Image (spheres, rainbow, N blue to C red):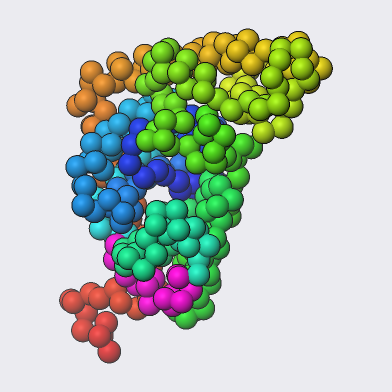
């Protein structure tokens, strides 16, 4: 039988090349081999955007455009909106009884996010229980393989802790532990060399990026600061241009030739960057065109999302009933013995 994949994105903005390398490329392959559910995690996005819900609402449509443009097939992948599956929130509540506040506070992923966002003591309860919410997402849909980056691994570990505790308390095997599925290139740095890629930082390229956008971003890319003259030997380690060529140039022999040339000297940074501009334009152009076509058909796009959400809700209802049966809280009022 096909294994179940559960993955998703927070709709806080358009997706970009980092998302493609880290997850979308993987999903395109997985949808042909597995039973894949992709969640637009709007409820989780609200944990730190609760005061700007319009941002989340608008970007749900943008993320859908990105999914369909890159080739996520709604006939093979169920795409759904998290907030429209009430069973997720009920299961989150049950799981909260199985996790201590101390354990949540020391989750490495949560701690890193809090520091990055400058939350400290002002962190909301909704943000703090993020790992429990993800545990509900994974288990409600029976996720067996979860595409994650190394920074998200502690979330999956905590999910499996909850699964083991639940199964032990209720003497059941209704919940299954999930395994991580790592991408070949789990992290693409920002164009400026920083680990975080973000459109707001001006170091990311989205699938709607124009030729001019590509040129402007690539021109600012970090190369080798000691490569001052064309004839000087250059380093490829930490050179963002080569990182992007490795990820997007389909001609690997050509990339290796460029690396050899750069290391021995005689290849200028601007020549290298112009090549990358061409490579990225060839990759983004068809996605940009497809995305624009889809944008002109909003009803079609939203119908796909609606259908996927209905399928996910039906699955959630079935799974939650099984989970509540194991907890002995699936009450049937027509049968008095259910309360004895």
Residue at x 41% of width, y 24% of height: 207
- Location of residue 65 with respect to 77 vertically, above or below: above
Nearer to me, 181 or 329: 181
Magenta residues, dominant SS class: helix
Q: Position of residue 309 (x, y in %)?
A: 28, 44
Q: How many marks?
A: 0
Nearer to me, 217 or 136: 217
Q: Position of residue 38 (x, y in %)?
A: 40, 42
230 magenta-colored: no
Q: Judge left or right: residue 297 versus residue 281.
A: left
Nearer to me, 178 or 156: 156
Q: Judge left or right: residue 13 versus residue 184.
A: left
**Residue furthest toward the bottom?**
340
Residue at x 21% of width, y 47% of height: 53
> Which quarter shows the C terminus?
bottom left
Q: Is residue 140 visible?
A: no
- Location of residue 182 with respect to 133 vertically, above or below: above
95 magenta-colored: yes
Q: Quadrant of residue 319?
A: bottom left
**Residue furthest toward the right?**
264
Q: Judge left or right: residue 105 versus residue 294.
A: right
Q: Judge left or right: residue 139 versus residue 33.
A: left
- Location of residue 236 with respect to 57 vertically, above or below: above
Residue at x 45% of width, y 58% of height: 115
Q: Position of residue 153 (x, y in %)?
A: 56, 56
Q: Is residue 151 visible?
A: yes
Residue range in magenta is 89-105
Nearer to me, 219 or 15: 219
Residue at x 27% of width, y 50% of height: 49
Q: Position of residue 338 (x, y in %)?
A: 27, 82
């Amino acid at each position: 039988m096909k294994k179940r994949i559960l993955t998703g994105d927070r709709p806080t903005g358009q997706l970009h090349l980092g998302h493609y390398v880290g997850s979308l490329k993987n999903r395109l392959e997985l949808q042909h081999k597995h039973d894949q559910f992709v969640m637009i995690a709007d409820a989780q996005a609200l944990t730190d955007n609760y005061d700007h819900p319009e941002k989340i609402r608008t970007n749900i449509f943008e993320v859908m455009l990105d999914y369909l443009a890159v080739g996520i097939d709604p006939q093979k992948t169920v795409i759904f909106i998290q907030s429209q599956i009430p069973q997720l929130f009920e299961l989150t509540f049950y799981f909260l009884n199985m996790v201590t506040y101390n354990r949540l506070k020391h989750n490495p992923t949560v701690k890193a996010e809090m520091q990055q966002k400058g939350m400290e003591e002002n962190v909301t309860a909704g943000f703090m229980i993020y790992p429990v919410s993800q545990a509900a997402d994974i288990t409600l849909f029976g996720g067996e393989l979860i595409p994650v980056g190394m920074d998200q691994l502690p979330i999956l570990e905590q999910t499996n802790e909850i699964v083991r505790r639940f199964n032990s308390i209720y003497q059941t095997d209704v919940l299954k532990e999930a395994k991580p599925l790592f991408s070949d290139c789990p992290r693409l740095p920002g164009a400026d060399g920083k680990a975080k890629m973000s459109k707001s930082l001006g170091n990311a390229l989205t699938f709607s990026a124009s030729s001019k956008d590509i040129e402007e971003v690539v021109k600012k890319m970090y190369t080798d600061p000691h490569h001052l003259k064309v004839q000087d030997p250059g380093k490829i380690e930490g050179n963002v241009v080569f990182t992007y060529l490795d990820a997007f140039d389909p001609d690997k022999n050509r990339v290796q030739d460029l690396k050899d040339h750069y290391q021995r000297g005689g290849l200028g940074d601007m020549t290298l960057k112009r090549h990358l501009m061409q490579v990225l334009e060839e990759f983004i152009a068809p996605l940009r065109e497809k995305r624009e076509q889809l944008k002109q058909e909003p009803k079609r796009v939203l119908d796909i999302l609606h259908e996927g959400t209905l399928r996910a809700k039906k699955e959630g209802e079935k799974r939650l009933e099984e989970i509540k049966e194991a907890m002995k809280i699936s009450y049937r009022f027509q049968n008095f013995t259910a309360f004895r």
